[in-house]
Image: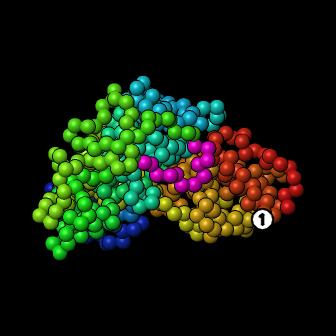
Amino acid sequence: GDRLRQAARERGGVSRVSVATVRNDRKAAPDAVSLAGAPLWPLRGVPRDVSQAWALAEAVAAAAPTDELREELRALTARMTPAEKRVWLARRLQRHHRKPHQDEPALAFVECDRAGPQLPQLREMAAEGTGLFAPDVVGDFEVRFKNESAVGSAVLREWMDVCARRAFVRGGGTLLCTRDGGRTFWPNPAAVYANPHWRTDFEALGRLLGLAVWQQVTVDLPLHPYVGECLLRNGAPPLSGDGASDAERLAAMDPDVARSLAWVKDPANDPADLCLDFTDALIDAEHALEGDDDDAPPLPELPAPTRRTVAPGRDALGPDAAAAPLAPGSCVELRDGGEDVDVTAENSAAYVEAVAAWRLRTSLERPLAAVARGLRAAVPAVVLEDARKMLSAADFCRLLSGLRDLDVTDWRKHTRYAGGLRPDAREVDLFWDVVEGWAAGPPASKQRLHGLLQFATGSRRVPVGGFAHLVGLNGGRHLFTLASGHHMTPGSLPTAHACVCTIDLPVFESRAAAERKLLEAVLVGTKRFDEHETHTSDSEEDEG
């Protein structure tokens, strides 16, 4: 950095920056400042890429800002892939949290009871100031599952997925809802009126997301891009007229509702026929989990639900209140006394405006403020401000949750082989034959791919950029690896070394034996984390 600043001061301004990068073949201008001799930033040995070029250009711009450099930065930003933006954000957080000569980072420790409900365990951490609610979640973070022996990066990744699915998607707190069949999730407005722990629970969600960004982990909890936009704005929903229109945002959020509101607002129609009033429905329900979650613990028992009409300003539950589940037919008033105000042709425009304001802003303000408070534990506001310049809302959401669909061709292309195992070995052919068969099967069969990925890596999703950017030990990139199981007995099941994304393959006597062993290993290996569990098959019967 000193060398770059000195060069900038000596020249009194920089018109163009020449940066060595595998993707930048632009020839330097004759008056360019050469950075070829500058050390790699911020980590020695990091491959040169666009995100590195951006960081170097930013360093020069900080010393001698010019319009030309600002244009260079904008151009580099536009050229970054989502995977490169993920690298940029990780480096930016390292710069913020890791100062020279600082003390050793604190240790946050979690012991998770996999068999128990997850949300009460997170609430206990909040009360004690431990685990996810430790004062410093960007120090060393260690997770151990109760009665399981394994520790390490993969255990952390699996615990984060368990929390995402069993605490927030379906944990009994009515925290998230979906309007597209589980492809994306939103904070559920009903939580504020049904769940007295909603502040703590939403903050826990934000802390989990922040930890995922810091640890470079993908969590199986895809947020809607509008939620990502709000989080990039420090939890504040955009105002009407700020960017896209309310109608455009509603159409992206819930196309059916947007079409219905357009019909109501159309002067050619009479909304009185629909018997509407100035309320909106509150749905106290959670989305069913995808995949094999038969071993999910039962949800905590709650009081019987009641049908209620609530007002946004006065009926939110406090932390000392009892849980108050909402029965079908519950609603929120969009104006004072809204339940007694019918929607007519004369007030239809006001009704549409009130619904948009509730769904896009009022219903989300308090949940998102709590999520943002938790997110800032790992991703502070100053970094979020920089991230807004670099990441779109969709980029941010993909960075958090990775890719929904698993591309077996990409998976196979970015696989390495170790321990003497060759790509043309019989066990390798049988492995990929089984995987490709699962990919071509019905949805339940496709879910086995996510189980296999979790078995091998601890995560059910692939990061942005695909399998070339798979995360292994301590957040570093590590390709999926198949290794020879020459040390294994004939009855052994495949064994995973999830911290380094590796599966040891035993001998497969047939394709049927390969599928049985892989499926059994996946079923066992995704229900507990113990290196002894998949050592041998439960049966020593003939493999054929």
- Residue 304 lies, with reference to residue 253, above or below; the image says above
User: Does the magenta portion include 198?
Assistant: no
Residue range highlighted in magenta: 285-296
- Residue 377 lies, with reference to residue 472, above or below; the image says above
Look at 21% across and 53% down and name the residue there. Answer: 278
- Residue placed farthest to the left in the image? 346
Look at 50% across and 52% down and name the residue there. Answer: 288
Name the secondary structure under disc 1.
helix
Q: Which residue is mark 1?
A: 511
Where is residue 298? Give x, y as percent. Answer: 56, 39
User: Does the magenta portion include 292?
Assistant: yes
* Residue 270 horizontal side relative to residue 80, left or right: left
Where is residue 192? Give x, y as percent. Answer: 32, 40
- Residue placed farthest to the right in the image? 542
* Residue 127 horizontal side relative to residue 381, left or right: right
Picture quarter with the C terminus: bottom right
Q: Residues within 10 Å of mark 1 (few under 14, many from 20)?
A: some
Look at 31% across and 52% down and name the residue there. Answer: 281
Where is residue 229? Give x, y as percent. Answer: 29, 55
- Residue placed farthest to the top in the image? 128
* Residue 375 horizontal side relative to residue 525, left or right: left
